[in-house]
Amino acid sequence: MTYSIHLIKLFTSREDHLFKLNEAERLKNVWNLLFFLLGLTILTYVWTAWLGLGTDAISANMSDLNRVEYEMRKAWFLIGRAGFAILLFLFTLFISSFFFWLFNNVSYKKLFILQMNVLLIMLIERITWIPLMVYAGVDWYVSPFSFGVIASYFTSIDWVIYLCGAISIFQLFIIWYQVKCISWLSKTKIGWIWVGVVFWHMLLWAGTAALSKFDLYLLYLLR
């Protein structure tokens, strides 16, 4: 059986398309979707950088720079964001799929397809950050869709706020979606699937918080 991948239908008609995916011997439309998601990921991060989001590091000493130096820093920042987008794309699709493949008797290719939808949700979340930061001045870690805004009322520890900010409604939906899909495709007990998925996301949230806390220090060291 040949299955032509439809990312949207894996949301709207999940069980029907998971059945087709599970029975499929060949997959179509993989490369088209890969290039589409890669382009969308790079475009999203370059767009946010072009709007000036996350440019604190290059704007901090703007008064000490001439026009050419500032534009050069901005250009390198855009290149850096594009590079980060490619790393996010590769990590989400390949590394996360590999982690779930290690602990579930599911084909790596099928987990790879599920991660395409996960990446799509992540990009939608990042697009919601744009109007919040541009028009309301709200940074990603205190987005109304995350728990960072609640954490900021109880603590002033940056890492804790970043950690809670990484946990959002979108992230919780991703966890639910991954558990539902993997439990459909795998014979692994659903309790263990929950443990594996939540544990993986806890590692990702902790890593995101650490990168957010130390990114400026790393940039200053690299200058």
Image: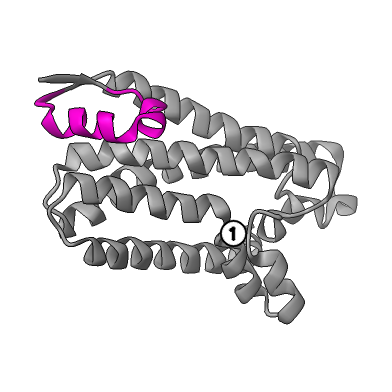
Q: Quadrant of the C terminus?
A: bottom right
Picture layout, residue 94 above or below residue 61: above
User: What residue do we see at 77% from left, 47% from top?
Assistant: 133
Residue 81 magenta-highlighted:
no
Where in the figure is residue 69, as x and y percent of width and height?
Answer: 77, 42
Q: Quadrant of residue 213?
A: bottom right
Picture layout, residue 144 above or below residue 211: above
Q: Quadrant of residue 51?
A: top right
Residue in the foreground of this view, choosing between 208 and 174:
174
User: What residue do we see at 19% from left, 37% from top?
Assistant: 109
Where in the figure is residue 83, as x and y percent of width and height?
Answer: 50, 40
Q: Quadrant of residue 34?
A: top left
Main SS of the magenta part reads helix
User: What residue do we see at 34% from left, 49% from top?
Assistant: 178
User: What residue do we see at 30% from left, 68% from top?
Assistant: 195
Question: Can you identify the residue that label 1 sits on?
Answer: 222
Image check: 122 left or right of 181?
right
Asked if residue 152 shows in the view, the reply is yes
Image check: 189 left or right of 147?
left
Residue 9 magenta-highlighted:
yes
Asked if residue 69 shows in the view, the reply is no
Over which residues does the magenta segment extend? 5-26
Picture layout, residue 4 above or below residue 110: above
Residue in the foreground of this view, choosing between 205 and 20:
20
